[in-house]
Amino acid sequence: MKERDLQRAVLDYFALQKDCFAVRINTMGVPLHGREGFRPSPMRGVADVLVCIKGKFLAIELKSSKGKLSAEQESFLDSVSKTGGYAIVASSLDAVMDIVEQIRKTEYLGVQEYAD
């Protein structure tokens, strides 16, 4: 499946989930009007889809079966994992649905407040 088709399927799936909020992140850059090319994105490597599932954060990088992560994408997913979020590379809707079900089974700890 092409990444574009996978992305559409994943976003359609999340649109039907009442306990999830998902957004598509475009890091391709902004077209330069009147000139060829793009102004680069200020933050490279952000996962394709960011999701909140009952207060839990999930970053999803979508790849075709032949797709490879860039160093920036690896770094982003690693940072999410190290700070307590969930981060996956998915090449199928089934993989996304599986992690969502696993996350739903974990306990929600609520928003933590930190003293200065």
Image: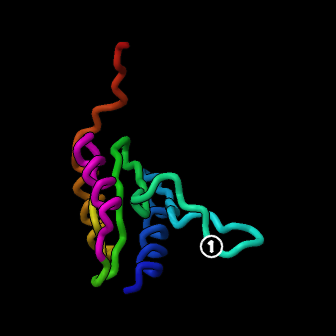
Which of the pair 91/19 is nearer the observer? 91
Q: Main secondary structure of the magenta part?
A: helix
Q: Residue furthest right?
A: 34
- Badge 1 local density, few (<14 within 10 Å), some, or many (20+)? few
According to the picture, the residue beneath numbered tag 1 turns out to be 37
Q: Residue at x 29, y 75 (%)?
A: 68
Is residue 10 toward the left or the right of residue 78 in the image? right
- Queried whether the magenta region covers residue 82, the answer comes back as yes
The residue that appears at 28% across and 66% down in the rendered structure is: 89
Percent coordinates x, y for residue 63 in the rendering: 34, 75
Q: Amino acid at mark 1?
A: Gly
Residue 5, relative to residue 40: is it above or below? below
Which range of residues does the magenta coloring cover?
Answer: 68-87
State the residue at coordinates (35%, 47%). 57
Q: Quadrant of the N terminus?
A: bottom left
**Residue 116 falls in which quadrant of the image?**
top left
The colour scheme used here is: rainbow
Q: Which residue occupies the extreme top position in the image? A: 116
